[in-house]
Image (tube, rainbow, N blue to C red):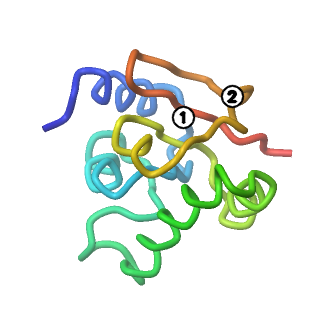
Amino acid sequence: YISGDEVRAFQWLRKNVPADALVLAGPRIGMFLPAWTSRRVIYGHPFETMNASAEKEAVHDFFRMAAADPPAARAFLVERGIDYIFYGSDERRLGTLDFLSDDEVFSSDGVIIYQMDSS
């Protein structure tokens, strides 16, 4: 199921984020996010994502990298053109994003959305 915090985050994304924005989220949220927000994700539904297994692994790699090597994680975000990161309970199980604390643009109890600097 989708929690109330996740729904509030989806609503915020739909209302406040450009239609062509690219969002990084964990695999479960990535499946729901496009339908709820009309925003693109790195990995979403496995049958609707090009190179789905590689993209799913890229999401997992990012979260593994985030705690171990924040500069490499930030470089990944830039290389992939990520505009926003959805960070909820599923994503917390994948890894921590302490290096993004200054980039928070939305928070609702269990969900944080980070915006990447476009410069």
Amino acid of disc 2:
Ser
**Which residue lies at the image location 70% right of the left edge and 42% below the top edge?**
116
> What secondary structure is found at the residue carrying circle 1?
loop
The picture places residue 56, in percent across and down from the top left corner, at 41, 70
Image position of 68 (left or right of 31): right
View extreme (top): residue = 109
Which residue position is annotated with label 1?
Answer: 17
**Which residue lies at the image location 44% right of the left edge and 51% below the top edge?**
94
Image position of 99 (left or right of 36): right
View extreme (right): residue = 119
**Where the C terminus falls, by quadrant?**
top right
Q: CA distance from mark 2 to mark 1?
A: 19 Å
The picture places residue 101, in percent across and down from the top left corner, at 69, 28
The picture places residue 3, in percent across and down from the top left corner, at 22, 28
> What secondary structure is found at the residue carrying circle 2?
helix
Nearer the N terminus, badge 2 or badge 1?
A: 1
**Which residue lies at the image location 28% right of the left edge and 53% below the top edge?**
28
In this view, the residue in front, 60 or 50, is 60
The picture places residue 26, in percent across and down from the top left corner, at 40, 53
Which residue position is annotated with label 2?
Answer: 101
Q: Is residue 54 above or below residue 45?
A: below
In this view, the residue in front, 92 or 29, is 92
